[in-house]
Amino acid sequence: MGFTLTRYLAVSVLAASAVVYHAFATRQYFYRSTIYLASSKIAVAAMGNLAFALALCAHQVVIKLFLGSLRDIEQEMIRERLSSAVMESLLALTIFREEFSTFFVAMFASLVFVKVMHWLVQDRVDYVEVTPTISLLGHARIVSFMALLLAADAAFLQYTIAGSIQSSGQSVQLLFAFEYVILASTIVRYGLKYGMSMADLAMDGTWTVRRT
């Protein structure tokens, strides 16, 4: 993690701690303090900012664990795709603007983080195909990362579908469900592409045709 992210996390923790201290120091009862933290715009903003900082740290840890250091082209790719993807999603989500809430923001932020992970996997698989010097550990990390993302897609998909059924299909969760269907299909496609690429590499590019 860079110094900037570390400083941002420290400031976020201090701000959230100050808000929590103020809530409990100025109110006699625990219930009133929690109501204040859940209803005050300043408190919600401070806690939401802390959650975002923690998510950024988790994002960096996951990348370091499964992909190592990012190449310059991968970092540039994230910057180029992120702005357009966020704008497209926000335009689509305006249909459900009456459902805007803290839960809405959390779901949207989760979707963006998961999308970024999928983009990194796609670019890394394309890179591995033309780089035969990847170590066995590197291959294991990529496969594990794809499996983790597929499990996350399935979990979010199950959750959003259940929420859509409870609201008779008239919910923003239906849109999130479609997004996770697309992401899961992308992981499956790149998993198959990766498997065929490794099989081709193992057979030195020669596929024998079995004749009956």
Image: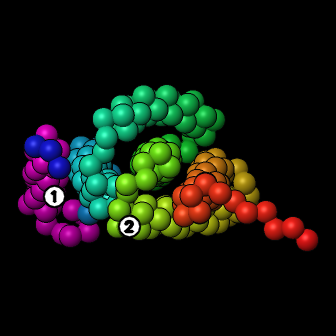
Q: Is residue 199 left or right of residue 123?
A: right
Nearest to the observer: residue 108 or residue 124: 124
Q: Position of residue 97 (x, y in %)?
A: 56, 37
58 shown above or below 99: below
Nearest to the observer: residue 191 or residue 108: 191
Identify the residue at horizontal 20%, vertical 70% (top origin).
30
Q: Position of residue 124 (x, y in %)?
A: 44, 48
Question: Which residue in the protein does label 2 denote?
Answer: 136
Label the magenta part by its dominant secondary structure: helix
The answer to whether residue 100 of the structure is visible from this angle is yes
Q: Is residue 171 left or right of residue 52?
A: right
- Identify the amino acid type marked 1: Val
Cα distance between the residues tagged 1 and 2: 47 Å
- Identify the amino acid type marked 2: Leu
72 shown above or below 30: above
As drawn, the residue found furthest toward the right would be 212
